[in-house]
Amino acid sequence: MAASTRSSPISIALVDDYDVVLLGVARMLDQYRGRVVTAEIDSNEAVTDTVDIVLYDSFAQPESDHDEIAVLVANPRARRVVVYTWNFHPDLVSSALEQGADGYLSKTLPARELVTALEAVHAGEQVVSESPLRARSAPGLDWPGRLEGLTDRESEILALITQGKNNADVAALTYLSPNTIKSYIRSIYRKIGVASRTQAVLWGVSNGFSPDHRRIAHWRGGP
């Protein structure tokens, strides 16, 4: 997978429901502005700029329901669509590719490798990262609750709970077992200092775990 020799950078739109997640990705990519430039950041908003690649971050999304991927693929402004995740369950990978995604990239990739993969997708390759062992997300990424000590996975589970999902829903959406979800929830409660689901939801609402609704056009000057 060779790096691109393009004279102009690839334009990218970042899509997810959470500003803090997308801003972390945008900042991470900024160091490679000669190769990739963030055109817009969309939290629950449709892509409006014509871009080379839409990078769809799957944080706290209903990953077993790929309607959002199909919508992005159908958008004529999105030349290519790439899923950005650390959940590599085979059903999720195959479903995304069947929906028309051009890539399925791991959030454990260092920024340099992520940019190289995006360039390969732009050049016409279908790029799927190797299924990672459970590892921390790449340095520079962000998520709600990180400063309070929540891991990216704990944060995602709390976000789904804040959205009103029950344990069975969360297990189905994340492809984790109910017992694993219960273990994560116990850890979350301990870290944020709550004793009940209601308290956890209230804490989540007060600390950035509700989905955002806005667009940031022309991030730091943009294309």
Image (tube, grey):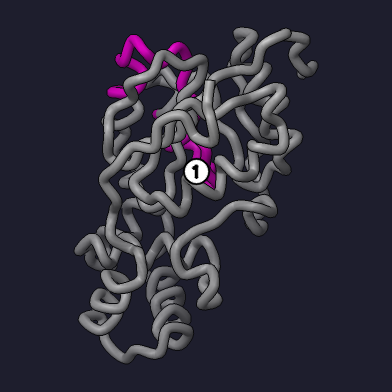
Q: Which region is colored magenta?
A: 70-95
**Left or right relative to 24: residue 59:** left
Mark 1: few, some, or many residues within 10 Å (few <14, many ≥20)?
Answer: few
160 or 222, nearer to the observer: 222
In the rendered image, the vertical position of residue 52 relative to residue 174, given as above or below: above
Where residue 63 appears, as percent x and y from the top left, is 36, 43
Where residue 15 appears, as percent x and y from the top left, is 40, 36
Note whether residue 106 is visible: yes
**Left or right relative to 100: residue 10:** right
In terms of secondary structure, where does tag 1 sit? loop
* Residue at screen point 69% across, 22% down: 35
Where residue 62 appears, as percent x and y from the top left, is 31, 46
* Residue at screen point 43% across, 78% down: 188
> Which residue is situated farthest in the front direction here?
221
98 or 40, nearer to the observer: 40
151 or 127, nearer to the observer: 151
In the rendered image, the vertical position of residue 31 relative to residue 165, given as above or below: above
Q: What residue type is labelled 1?
A: His
Q: Give the residue at mark 1.
A: 89
In the rendered image, the vertical position of residue 18 relative to residue 41, given as above or below: below
Is 92 one of the magenta-colored residues? yes
